[in-house]
Amino acid sequence: MSVPPVLALTAVTKFYGERQVLGGIDLLVREGEAVALIGASGSGKSTLLRCIDLLEEIDDGDIYLDGVAITDPGTDPVPIRRRLGLVFQAYNLFPHKSVLENVVLGAIRAQGVPRAQALESAHELLARFGLGGRERDYPDRLSGGQQQRVAIVRALITRPRALLLDEVTSALDPELVGEVLGIIRELKGDGMTMLIATHEMGFAREFADEVCFLDDGRIVERGAPEQIFSEPEHPSTRRFLARLLAGARA
Amino acid sequence: MHGSPTTRAERRQARRRQAQRSIAISATSTVVVLGAVALAIVLSPGWQTVRQTFFSWHYFKNVLPSLPGAFWLDARMFLIVEAVVLATGLAIALVRTIRAPVLFPLRLVAAVFVDVMRGVPLLILLYLIGFGVPALGFSFLPTDETVLGGAALAMCYSAYVSEVFRAGIESVHPSQPAAALALGLTRTQALRHVVVPQAVRRVVPPLLNDFISLTKDVALVSILGPQEIARVAQINGDLNFTYTPFVAAAMIYLVLTLPLIRIVDGQQRRALRRQNAAVML
């Protein structure tokens, strides 16, 4: 038996009241892999990521992190969340804290890293991602792209086993998308394991190891990017991609 | 397009003319309205009596030296009660926010306390605490009227202030605690490092408003007997059959409260500007 995948989902199901939002998701993300989740708004991408980070409870199925079930009833979510990184569409930086304080909060409070050491790695990471010199600024002084890069650094400093990215470029002006995608590309090069909900099809095609198309809470098609984007088999995947293409031309 | 283009100088001149006209109109209307009110008071049938009983220079000079000392008691009470109210108010708000099942009895007590305190007139509360607690006869409970009056004030205001804090805590968008939890913080840490600091910043203006009310309600403790400014003014007035000491006491109060009110208004304007600047959040 080889090493277990970093993330494994079996038949994950979630209801909001009577409405099923996730209908039995099976998914594997192996060490160093990047898996892209595509699909229309409301197809369940964000909910799936929030369920994996245990911000929401699932109603059926199991989620495994490094081969250990994390969704058994009664499991303490806090130590699990410490091993995962989640980046939000709207950045969700803490507006009352400086860039530096935003980045070190998790390291110091959740991971117990000594303050001096946390500050050192924060400076290092911020400099690496083009944010050197902005440490003392407050989030409202930064552009959207800079804020999202800070949010990624904030998730990275805790050295997560996997990074969950929830449409991290959807709130950005088009000219700022590139700087955030550049970081993700770099992380992929570093061997970071990632699960990415995205609307950037060109990007998903370029760097994802596997693309999963979600429709109405189910993965209706999955495969290598070339296959999904060039020869989609499922009619709803074809419709989705055609709509996107038409939108891009308009 | 007709005529010659308007120059920048012409536009500026027109704007200045308009501004001058506005100033002239508001000045005239102010003089007219205030003059009419003053005239109505002075021409009222009872004006002579009012002037003698409320605005007697003789009694004013007579009472003034005794007031600042009495006011010092109000100021001390205000400062101590305010500190207690801030701490208790935040504690009550936190108890009511944290959803841990262990805290349920505490949460129930806090909810009932806040409802009762907000529902009972402060004057009646003062009587109940001021005369009721000493009547219990426990040697460990205070019997000093100033302390008991301060306690009643603190209870009443803690209830109001806890609601202000709670509104602030609830106004922080759920995405903020979600981001804190995603970093691996516990619920308590998320509350302490992310939610409460933002909530407190937001409620500073309404809190200051409550504290202006408190500066004045301190005078109500006089009904229990302490020789604070309203009490001293009342005694002096009773002795001389005049209401002038109340006017003098009101003036001393205004010296403290007017600057406070200006500061609060300034704070509120700044907070509004900040909020409008940060619509992204």
Image (cartoon, coloured by chain):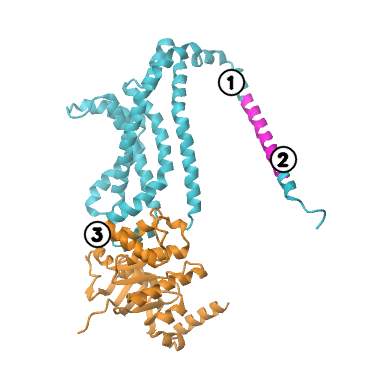
Q: Residue furthest right?
A: B3
Q: Amino acid at mark 1?
A: Ile
Q: Quadrant of the N terminus of chain B?
A: bottom right
Protein chain holding label 2: B
Answer yes or no: are tags 1 and 2 on the same subunit.
yes
Chain A's shade in the image?
orange
Q: Amino acid at mark 2?
A: Arg
- Mark 2 sits on what residue? B17
Percent from the top left, x then y, of residue A29? 31, 78
Q: Secondary structure at mark 3?
A: loop
Q: Look at discs 3 and 2 and give the one toward the viewer.
A: 3
Percent from the top left, x then y, of residue A184? 39, 73
Chain B's shade in the image?
cyan
At 49% across and 68% down in the image, what residue appears? A176
Q: Which mark is residue A191?
A: none
In the figure, B68 relative to A84: above or below? above
Protein chain holding label 1: B
Query: In this rendering, would A239 be left or right of A118?
Result: right
Gap between marks 1 and 2 measured at Cα: 37 Å
At 50% across and 43% down in the image, what residue appears? B269
In the figure, A14 relative to A141: above or below? below
Q: To which quarter of the image does residue A154 belong?
A: bottom left
- Mark 3 sits on what residue? A112
Q: Look at discs 1 and 2 and give the one toward the viewer.
A: 2
Provide the major secondary structure of the magenta segment.
helix
Answer yes or no: are tags 3 and 2 on the same subunit.
no
